[in-house]
Image (cartoon, helix red, strand yellow):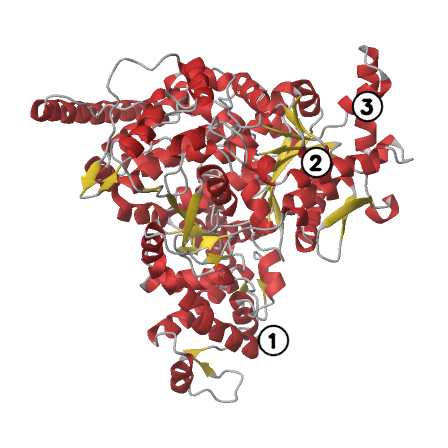
Amino acid sequence: DADSGFRENVVEEWGEPPDRPFAIPGVEFGNVLVTVQPPRGFGMDPSKVYHDSDLQPPHDYFAFYGWLRHEFDADAVVHLGTHGSLEWLPGKTVGLDAESAPDALVADLPNVYPYIVNNPGEGTQAKRRSYAAVVDYLTPPMASAGTYDELAELEELADRYREAGGEAGETVERLLRETIDELDLAVELGIAGEIDERADVRGPDEAGTTLAEGDVEGDEVDIDELVERVHAYLTDVKTTQIRKGLHTMGEPPAGDDLVEYLVALTRLENPGAPSLRESVAGVLGVDYEAMLETPGVYDETLGMTYAAAADAVHETSVELVETLAAHGFDLPESEAEAAPDDDTTMNLLVVDLEPLGDARVAGGAHDDLRAVLSYICEEAAPRVLAAEGEIPQTADALDGDYVPPGGSGAPTRGGVDLLPTGRNFYTLDPRKVPARSAWEVGREVADDTLERHHDDHDEYPEEVGVVAWGTPTVRTRGETIAQVLALMGVRPIWTDAGRVDDVEAIPLEELGRPRVDATTRVSGLFRDAFPQAAGVVHDAVEAVVDLEEPHEMNYVKKHVEEEAEELEAEGLDPEAARDAAMPRVFTTRPGGYGAGTNKAVDEGNWDDRSDLAAVYVQWGGYAMGSRGRVSENHDAFRRRLGSVEATVKIEDTMEQDEFDSSDWYAFHGGFITAVSEVAGSEPASYVGDSSDPDNVDVYTNEEKVRKAMRARVLNPEWLDSMEDHGYKGAGDLSGTVDVTLGWDATTGVVSDTLWSEVAERYAFDADRQAWMREVNPWALESITDTLLEAIDRGLWDADDDVEEQLQDLNLRVDGDLEGRATERERSEGSGTSERPRREQEEVASDDD
């Protein structure tokens, strides 16, 4: 019963339907069918990735949904898990018609969609384009990453150096430097030579070398400074919040997971509650700002480094919440047992809180601590534990009952009030982007990025490439767009109601630097949800392009005028040339989503970085102008890429990181690759970390990716936690290795050392290998495939014996799978367990 227009689109893409049965996988439990959404289709014809951002679904996809509606006669469908591909299929962006693929497929079938609470943008996409009734669920339990294995040994050596002297000190210093070299931490510690020298290590077409493999100059760094840097780096890794496994719907975290999650939720200020971390620091007599900004410095009063003080603050925070949990979060009962006195060293909730060393308690710290502990008992804990209502609310939705509305965003970013889950979340008014709060944070990220670039390169970049996604825009109310405006030296003007009414140029005397040009690649979701925000950027360009300012202080004006002059010389009239030089926001073709780069990597359909760059340019060459209107303009996109000297992407929450899905490398890594190819030189690349809005930080992309690898990807605690989730846990490990390949293919930031550690922990670890063989041998096969691909492509210069081990393991797993398939064929008479690589666990993420 497909609309004739939709059917014509599918036939034009894939030809007439094949004359064969369509297999519908699944298991029936009475009236419930548990099945798997069909593959999107790029794996069926990998060449389509180079030209089809709006690929129509294949016949198998249509047959699947048609069978559900007309043969299985489903009364409703539940799309379980964030997220599927239905809502990302071609068609109108909003107000779908029958020719739009999602409408043609789901039609009037009720769609109940459990969705993670911190992904409101894509959840809204599911509502707009597949008519979903959302029931949100909790984020996975969070915990501090801590240290492990060689990182723990490095921390011990750094601690020992301060205590050692004479020959013992020289021995510790030698061991410390050797350990740093073995772990390949030169980039992280800032001792890998000059930035420009390292950028020259890899040319635009050399995906096989890495920026991380420049000449290490660690021996030239004074040992005291080196120890300070080690402490600072390890503190940054240790205090990173990482997920522990996955969330199971209807099951709130319990035991240690609940304690750690509550510590993470109250780490920052929440509405009506101070920060637990800052309050504990105050009671322990720790200078909070110094702890955050100079962890490697030794404080004589404390008798320890601020890094050690940070450990004490975290351990004390955990102990306090453990005490609350032991009393069932009944604060009056806890207070009664605490029997506090009036001394500054009073017992508080049965935990002795004495200042560290000779420090003194900060004024008001005890009151703040009591306030946040009360908040945990009365607000945070009950809201988390209410996650047990997620499945009952889903059942209510299937019964046609009302699902109550709720907020959305990152709970660990001061968002406890976004809980409880089990609600139909809503987002924000797009006319209020960027909000005043977002402007303050975005401006700080812009300033810090430019300052970092100036420190590294002794000059400001003339043009910066920015990645803007829809979901973070919802969570932060527009920090990335605020950053773009701030780079240009423009600020929003708001109405009393908070809507952005206009923009104004910041006077150069106030700005204190040149206006930096900015080219923004926005996602398809951003294109659909925030056309007004794209219009604000267009207004910002208009606000500064005609100012009476010299080119050396207004790079927007410089580039528009120079480009317009070149276009006039090619035959355009002056007005048309100026208009053609103005676009600064680019996206995917309407109806299409994603950056494309990950599709090429997933299918192995590329030879070098120029291929990946070509995909990025092809998918992203659609300009957004005033009011967010979209038009094809690949020439303008190439011109802008050719002028970009640096790229930046804001990460606003620790609940996700660069290895969560292929989107991260597809958009930012693809941007870097495209600039490198079009401009002919590698851009500087940065990540603005606004996960703590009051303490913004800026990393290079290389630093941030490697930090994510050390904090989570290689962390035994996270790896072990995934084993609690069987087939799905193993599949996620496989996906993580795929993303690692994508980052190295696009940016070359994964060193041989890191590849070796990935192989050791994901493939060679005997216990993990045995677990995957049992729960999901296809995941182990995929992991070995990907590791061998990294070697074959020259991304990883592995030792010969390592390559042989991987080949042997791959053959053994493949043999096991063939044996399993043969056994099943004998018992069932047909079937096979063979599935296409990566398409077998196709990453659902098509956008942000």
Residues 193 and 454: in front is 454
Give the number of the mark in front: 2 or 1. Answer: 2
Q: Earlier in the sequence, mark 2 or mark 1?
A: 1
Tell me the crowding category of disc 2: few under 14, some 14 to 19, or many 20 or more residues within 10 angstroms, Cα based.
some
Residues 301 and 15: in front is 15
Contact check, label 1 and label 3, Cβ < 8 Å: no
Contact check, label 3 and label 2, Cβ < 8 Å: no
Residue type for callout 1: Ala
Q: Is residue 355 in view?
A: no
Mark sitting on residue 627: 2
Q: Is residue 499 in view?
A: yes
Question: Can you identify the residue that label 3 sits on?
Answer: 578
Residue type for callout 2: Arg
Image quadrant in which you'd find residue 797:
top left
Give the number of the mark in front: 1 or 3. Answer: 3
- Position in image of residue 804 (x %, y %): 28, 22
Image quadrant in which you'd find residue 452:
top right
Question: Can you identify the residue that label 1 sits on?
Answer: 362
Residue type for callout 3: Arg
- Position in image of residue 122 (x %, y %): 49, 42
What is the CA distance from the residue labelled 1 to the residue labelled 3?
Answer: 59 Å
Report whether 493 appears left or right of 286.
Answer: right
